Amino acid sequence: MAGRNIIELKGIVKRFYIGQPNELEILHGIDLSVKEGEFVSIVGASGSGKTTLMNIIGVLDRPTEGEYILDGVDVAKAKDKELSGIRNQKIGFVFQTYNLISRTSALRNVELPMMYAGVGKKERQERAKHYLEMVGMQDRMTHKPDELSGGQKQRVSIARAMTNNPSIILADEPTGALDSRTGRKIMDIFHQLNQQEGKTIVLITHSNELAEETQRIITLKDGEIIGERKGSAVC
Amino acid sequence: MLIGENILLALSGLLANKMRALLTMLGIIIGIASVIAIMSVGNSISTSVTSSMEDMGVNNITLGVSQKSTEDTVTSDGRVFAGVSRGSEMSDDDYITDEMLDAMQEEFSDSAASILLSESAGSGTAEDGDLTANVTITGVNSDYLEYEELTLLAGRTLTDRDQENAKKVVLVSDRVADNLFGGDYNAAIGSEINIYVSNRYYTYAVVGVYEYDDSGFSTESEEDVTTTVYLPLEAAREQNHSSTGYSQLTIVTATGVDSTALCDELETWFNNNYYRSNDSFEVTASSMESMVSSMTDMLSTVSIAISVIAGISLLVGGIGVMNIMLVSITERTREIGTRKALGATNGSIRLQFIMESIVICLTGGFIGIAMGLLLAAAATNLLGYAASPSVGGIIFSVTFSILIGVFFGYYPANKAAKMNPIEALRYE
């Protein structure tokens, strides 16, 4: 693969309740880089700081200390409005609980990131349809999330993550709420996106089994990276 | 583009929660409906009252001789009698004379444009063999005829010579000509008609036929309608054997003259010059303008009172909208978090919820306008006026609804916009 670093974390520290008696340091200086086209997993038990790390990688939160370069942009110092734009353009989120907007159709849900990017209506629909087809949801585009199964919802949310052609897909326990068969299908889609589309994927999970499928496994414990090894997937 | 999307989104949200939306909008609906109803009813009342008063001549002054009222009298045993009018008959000396009018015209030449004199000479039937027509005879001077602006269909109007010589010539309406001459107006000209009034026949020659204006109310059928026969003023007086004065007359004021002020001046002038020594009679003047303005004052007082109630209703409605927006934002915390994760800026979240608030208020506003117009139509129908929807009221209501939406939507929307995306996403 190209070998360019898409994510570069240097000395990331995250503290909460700064200056208060209950000040808490969750991340104690994380150094991590992810190359373009890589499929990386971050594993750790609950309380290991992996959600906090994901929030920082997904620019939902800023680090207290340290440097974060995402696709060549220094995001640690960016303003709120710039962070919105970075989330919109460079990151595709896939959540454990899907987080689809229940009142609107699958198609509209997929259109949403493009709406915030200011893409015209016609192009929005075409692109949304294209990605829904890619995840095998072409027959259920007009259904509302309530009318879809968990696996189908997750496919829609993957399509949504893809529409703005982001630099990375950030998946937080994407199969956590699914049975193992459906979860398998979702994982297959991620492999497909990684291999065929060349997408960089960061998978956050507590399941070692799923992590084994990725190219590189980063283990987090008590706010520090304690291990890094190759997975079974071919680079 | 985002605005259009937000409107659609808000509408679908409203439809998904119909009952809640309706209850939320109720305050706005009631407020707007009462504003529209009162403005429309007030509008149609004042339009029809003003137009009917203008027909009568808002700037005309009616001058009349009326009895002076006595002072309160206290009898020797202490009982008080309130002042009453003395029931004395008018004698020839009490009437307004032509000399007074000439002097008045000279004194008030700038403000009094013309003097309309008329004398009623009774109602009866014009007859020609078996054919009849209902008429009232009115003696008029030339200013009066000019002011009436009759449309002549045949013949001529009454001339100054007719007036000076008190000729027994008349103008009749086309209805009279239809009934007596079969609609042949030219045949009517020069014909003599007999008018039966107060058990006597009077014979007059027709010199002109005018077009009857039937815009006013009439309970009679087309054929039986009573129309006016115009006669020279002096001829009418001869018929009545009346004295040479006037008990009532109308003054048309020149344009731009304040008729209310002129009323006072005329009263003072007449009473100082001619009625100072008259024990029982005086001249009083009144204009339509004072009646119109007191009517308008009353209407606007009622409007203000109802507007205050409507305003309170709108305020309560606005608070209701704010409340429901706060609830809605709490319910949709995860949605807000998701939108932020997908790249929504604080501004676009704020816009979304303000638009939602505006859509609620505007929908309520439109329902309120419709209900207000229905109410107004029913009320004006009941009162017997022509319905006249207030366009200003509608524009005001739409604008005000939007303003309420923005005002009461801003705080909740801002709260949504400032949510921390991480906490919002984790919200259960």
Image: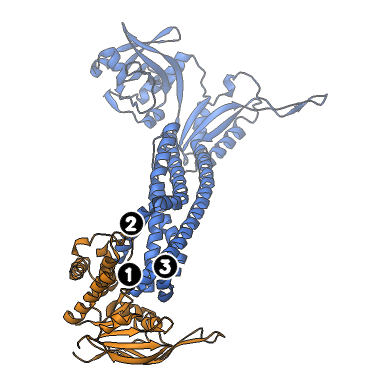
Q: Residue at x 26, y 66 (%)?
A: A152
* Position of A173 relative to B293 (above/below): below
Instruction: Give the residue type that dot 1 points to.
Output: Tyr
- Secondary structure beneath label 2: helix
Colour of chain B, in one word, is blue
Instruction: Give the residue type that dot 2 points to.
Output: Ser
Where is residue B123 shown, x and y percent of the image?
43, 15
Q: A65 or B347, which lies in front? A: A65
Where is residue B420 shown, x and y percent of the image?
43, 75
- Residue B333: assigned label: 3
In this orientation, does residue A164 appear? no
The colour scheme used here is by chain
* Circles 1 and 2 in contact, beta carbons < 8 Å: no
Chain for numbered disc 1: A
* Position of B261 relative to B220 (above/below): below
Mark 1 vs mark 3: same chain? no
Chain for numbered disc 3: B
Rounded to the nearest whole Å, what is the CA distance between mark 1 and mark 3? 15 Å
In this orientation, does residue B264 appear? yes
Mark 1 vs mark 2: same chain? no
Q: Which residue is mark 1?
A: A98
**Chain given the colour orange:** A
Instruction: Give the residue type that dot 3 points to.
Output: Thr
Q: Which residue is mark 2?
A: B12
Q: Residue at x 37, y 65 (%)?
A: B352
- Residue A6: assigned label: none
Relative horizontal placement of residue B317, taking residue A12 as reference (left or right): right
Write down the quadrant of residue B424 in the picture: bottom left
